[in-house]
Image: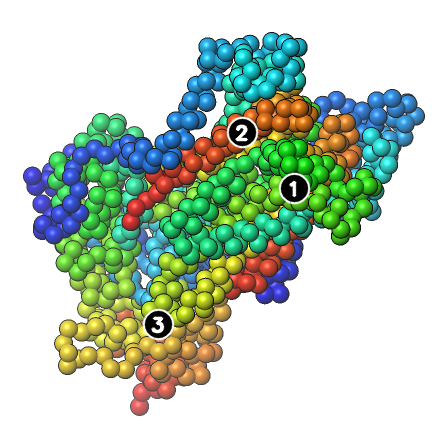
Amino acid sequence: MHGTFDSSDIDAVIVPVRHFSYRRVVLGRFMRQPIAMTAALILLAIVLAAIFANVVAPADPFQTRVARRLAVIGTEGRWLGGDELGRDVLSRLIYGGRISLSMAVLPVAIGLFVGGFLGILAGYAGGRTNMAIMRAMDVFYAFPSILLAVAIAGALGPGMMNGIIALSMVFIPPIARMAESVTTQVRSYEFVIAARLSGASTGRILREHVLSNVAGPILVFASSQVSVSIIAASGLSFLGLGVSPPYPDWGLMLSALRQSIYVNPWVAALPGAMIFICSVCFNLVSDGVRRAMEVRR
Amino acid sequence: MSVTFSAMQAPLPPIEDRGGPSQPLLIARGLRKEFRLADGLFGGRTVVHAVDDLSLTVNKGETVGIVGESGCGKSTAARLIAGITPADDGEVVFDGESFWTPRTRIDAERRRAIQMVFQDSASSLNPRMTLTETLAFGPRAHGVPTAVARTYARDLLAAVGLPPSRFAERYPIQLSGGQRQRVNIARALAIRPRLLILDEPVSALDKSVEAQVLNLLVALREELSLSYVFISHDLNVVRYIADRVVVMYLGQVVEEATSAQIFAAPRHPYTRALFASKPSLDPRRRIEAPPLTGDPPDPVNPPSGCRFRTRCPIAEAVCAAAKPPLAAAAPEGEGHKVACWAAQPGSGHSLAPRPMGALQ
Amino acid sequence: MLLYILRRILYAVPIGIGVTFIVFSLVHIAPGDPISALLPNEATQEMVEAARKEFGLDRPFLVQYAIWLGNAAMGNLGTSIGSGRPVATEVASAVGNTFILAVSAGLVACVLGFLLGIVAGLWRDRPVDHVVNLITIAGVSVPHYWLAILLVIVFAVDLNWLPPLGMGPDRSGGWQFDWAHISHLILPTIATAAIPMAVIARTLRASVVDVLDQDFVTTLRAKGLPRQRLLWHVIRNALPTALAVMGLQLGNMLGGSVLVETVFAWPGTGFLLASAIFQRDLPLLQGTMLVLAMFFVFLNLVVDLVQSATDPRIRRA
């Protein structure tokens, strides 16, 4: 037994010895934030409604009916009004979540993987690799984000895939920057140096030491981008660069219903309201997650 | 529950001694490292000579202390020797075999011979790993099966005085500074190194805890026949643990001697100033005048000749002219080296001892 | 300091070149033969051959890029497929209109954002802070094209106070400082300003709170510094961050203008871009993008320089 230890050393930190899972702590802290929880539940409801749209939606989103053209809110069978072809706006809003939310979430997910990979690589490798990757990112950063998406989607032409590709190009650079800066920081920490000294392979160090410490901040940052993404994605559809009619999509619906604001103004506002609600909720949830993950001093 | 290292079933084989007892464990020659600050316009560079022509020898079983002000290059030197920061020049020979040169990389198996213990901080241990996971990592990287490595990790905890029943599943945030340092030491020892480089290992600790950690280090050194390079700015600590002391100033070694020699009779004006600034517990010996005046010079443009001359009380013209070599100090002879013109016979400095031939 | 400015300008050069490269590549990521993207569908064989020669499409990619870059530097951005007029002319006439909208929205966003942020920061956790918080959350989350439509519904359709479309009464596109023109500007300004206003307010609140928590402010308070003088210290310390965000937001406003200008049929670059996309007029798309992106690069440069002038810590580098 080496070095006698006295009680002041051992009990300086009084922490009950128990397994404490980081994830559970964060989840607990998140659930104690009423606003973020409400936002999360609203999002969940919208997502579930979109997934089970065929059960939830009161009508066929594609079925046109001339008599219900531009029906006002409250019309029987068209509770949230009818669109320019007499289709049920409520059903189209519910179905619209499928395309609109995918077009918002997928680009961020792609950005997370590609940008995260590039950023961690640049941050851990340092030197010339870092220079090459980050300077390339800087160039994409030199475009206002929506403009870049519009330009790429504009060149590629309309279509959901093209929209997703264009938006991914927007989210890769900021996520890569974020990943690079946290990785550079974590790389300088003594525990990483100790791991390198132990002779462990770079892959093992990245997997076991670096990834677990950079994943949190990168994920939080990426989640904060979803609210930007949904606005941009619906913006592309609004310009006619997303899915093509007759598929229901909030941006596309907004653009179509906009033509009839003099006849039926408030129905035209509805698809935008869905985009707004989702964007607000994504923002609030991401704020909540960030707060739940904050290190308390 | 007193587990000792010698009684422990270590899953990794020890590193065989090759050179025999007289072969120094570590020889570092001419280490050099420049850091480039922001690149200037059109490729003009700002260069900091963090470590400039540093040589160091550590004998088997020996503890070498490196002291100096913060920013003198101690920590860079440590990382250069360990091969974690690539050096611009120089080489390290370990137990008679090349450890690294600027062109060769160290293979994983040999790398484990030299490990480091860092100053205690929030980032010295991975906050996302339990202590068991942290201690099992190194052995697993060397092919030890996870289950074996985890059992071994618990033994390691016990050996550094942390009962595994209470500590094995803890996270670093649940430890005090002293406990974290014990884990740091255990992590370094987990892969059975022969040389430990300790970079300010007790500087962040309370005085009472510091003594416990130092005692642990001394006990481990005996039991595992380790050698230490012990970096600290605390002279009392170095005096307690080191057999030999190296004093660094602005990336260069200015004095080197055994602990006894250097604490009894420091020769370099910088060492003297450093020792004079050591607080004494005796109020009658309180420090009145500041022993060192002025800031350290800008490392980007170090002074010509002797780098200490701008703050040196005995600087003369010769000090600006040329850099004094690290040479044996005249009266003490063997083992005591100093880089100061005032200690070099025939240097032209007014305080220099007279050369042999000039004796009448 | 001078060195820093020079270095920062030099750094902008490769970025600018990278930007031109991406803009150039736009035509080449478009599906099909670039020549078909550059010419109207009914183009004759001679036109195709002439264009091939003009753009050097038979040459290697990088040579084409060099030719295009050289032409662009001389002010030749190609010919619009839709109108048949030079792209440079089209863009030039649109830039001024976007500029009017950007300046007015930028002013509104900066002034309001600055005020809201400072007020919220100074009265942290009081009711006024919560109100500002609500406004900014809504602001950063609002799809501005939807806000634009809402504004039209309320103020143009329902109340009939303001015009829903265009830039002036005569449709000619000229700008004058009279009510007829200003009334056309109000709704687009609000829609464009919403997001930057919210972001600026948020950032400013955060940095005010940050500054107030610092030790030197506690010291100033303890020494009895009057409140308004304290405010000056706070603003001075929060300013560099605020400026950086403002600059970036002004740039993003340019991006956002694509959608807002479309809603209001405001004849600016965004509208031009949208119609270029709608008509698959790639030379026009390319030219407009080039001008907007280069402006954004320039803006970033200016922001960095202004920021370094207000923040002594940056100059050390």
> Is label 3 on the same chain as label 2?
no
Q: Distance of mark 3 from mark 1, alpha carbons?
A: 48 Å
Classify 10 Å Cα crowding around label 2: few (below 14), some (14-19), many (20 and above).
Answer: some
Q: Residue B47, position in %: x, y?
A: 51, 61
Q: Given the image, what chain letter belongs to the residue carrying mark 3?
A: C
According to the image, label 2 marks what residue?
A: A273
Label 3 sits on residue: C223
Position above or below: B30 against C256? below
The residue lying toward the viewer, choosing from A217 and B338, is A217
Residue C77 sits above or below residue A109 on the image: below
Query: Where does the image place residue B133, in percent across and percent down from the top left?
Result: 26, 35
Residue B24: which quarter of the image?
Answer: bottom left
Pick the front one: C226 or A143: C226
Going by the numbered disc 2, the residue's amino acid type is: Ala
The tag on residue C187 is 1
Question: Which residue is at a point 30% across and 58% down the rendered structure image?
Answer: B57
x, y percentage for residue B308? 39, 74
Residue most extreme to the bottom: B360
- Please say whether residue B323 is visible from this viewpoint: no
Judge by depth and name the residue closer to the eye, C30 or A200. C30
Tell me whether circle 3 and circle 2 mark residues in contact (CB < 8 Å). Answer: no
For residue B231, side relative to residue C312 (left or right): left
Asked whether the viewer can see residue A54, the reply is yes
Which is more toward the observer, C120 or B290?
Answer: C120
Three-letter residue code for mark 1: Leu
Say which element carries label 1.
Answer: helix
Q: Badge 1: few (under 14), some or many (20 or more) residues near its Cα, within 10 Å?
A: many
Labels 1 & 2 near each other (Cβ < 8 A): no
Are labels 1 and 2 on one chain? Answer: no
